[in-house]
Amino acid sequence: MNKPNHILAVALAIVAALSALSAPAMAQYDPAGPRLRVLTYNIHHGEGTDGRFDYQRLAKMINDLRPDIVAVQEVDRGTGRADGVDQAAVLGKLTGMRSTFGNAMHYDGGEYGEAVLSRYPILGVRVHHLPFRYGQEPRAALAVAVQPEGMPELLFVGTHLCHQSSATRLEQCQQLDRILPAGGPLPVILAGDLNARSGSDAMAVLLDGRWIDCVAPRSRIDYVLVRKEDPWQVTSVNIIDDRVTSDHRPVLVELVWTGEIEQEVAAAEEPAAATPLAPAEASDETDQPR
């Protein structure tokens, strides 16, 4: 190398080094991205198709799938039919996960609704009651904020929509689309038993708009949805063919986060400002027949 070229190479190396020193600190980017294992599971108020309330069996099913976060539907707390058991708390203990419960209705001396299990701390909780008509079961969406490792804080919403009326399911999907707006400060995952097929009017509200069905083309009525604007990629879908532990099959989706690391660092530094949730709302619904 002649002398002028040598001097130019040294100068460029110095400029590059100074630029690196002045750049904002960022974590090392992993091309594969951090992963999140999302499970949705309707547990049929804890009762298997063999008539047994076997919480060890339910917990084993969940643990064997190694989820990071779980949307659980048809959960009892303190009801007569479940012998007064707080099912969310019991499953949380047996799986070693954090748990929270969202009341959709009062039933049989206790409560009935949704639960979320999470391997990560639950930073905020809110219950959104969904529209229903007289004679139908009240439904709710349980929203929690969590901070998974290597990702931004995110909003995880579990729900169970009406099985009695397509018109009510349509209204419930419209409300979900309103309360989970586009362009919010947090990524959003919506999971649960939506009691609707992908070609229905209710699902069109979500899927023709800004949501992606992560289970497609294998979707039936249990879904994991993400917003189109949030940088997730689906790496695998696993539907467990177990028809005894519950009358629904557990559906597991593994997602990889492909967003910027700088955004993740910022979200991690200011969790309180990024959490638009409050303690769970008290339910004012009256007893309804199951």
Image: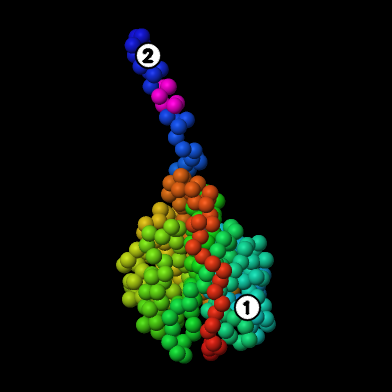
State whether residue 48 is above or below residue 184.
below
On the image, the x and y values in percent for residue 179 come to: 42, 69
Tell me the quarter of the image containing the N terminus: top left
Residue at position x 67%, y 81% from top? 84
Residue 85 appears anywhere in the view = yes
Toward the top, the furthest residue is 3
Q: Residue at x 42, y 64 (%)?
A: 225
Q: Quadrant of residue 244?
A: bottom right
In reply to whether residue 14 is colored magenta, the answer given is: yes
Q: Secondary structure at mark 2?
A: helix
Q: Which residues are magenta?
A: 13-18
Mark 1 residue crowding within 10 angstroms, few (<14) / some (14–19) / many (20+): many
Q: From the viewer's perspective, is residue 61 above or below residue 24? A: below
Q: In the figure, 2 relative to 249: above or below?
A: above
Which residue does the numbered mark 2 point to in the structure image? Answer: 7
Can residue 38 be seen by looking at this rendering?
A: no
Which label lies toward us, 1 or 2? 2
- 155 or 93, which lies in front? 155
State which quarter of the image contains the C terminus: bottom right
Give me the C-alpha separation between circle 1 and circle 2.
75 Å
The one of 9 and 273 positioned closer to us in this rendering? 273
Secondary structure character of the magenta stretch overall = helix
Question: For the point 36% across and 82% down, which residue is it?
Answer: 167
Residue highlighted by disc 1? 77
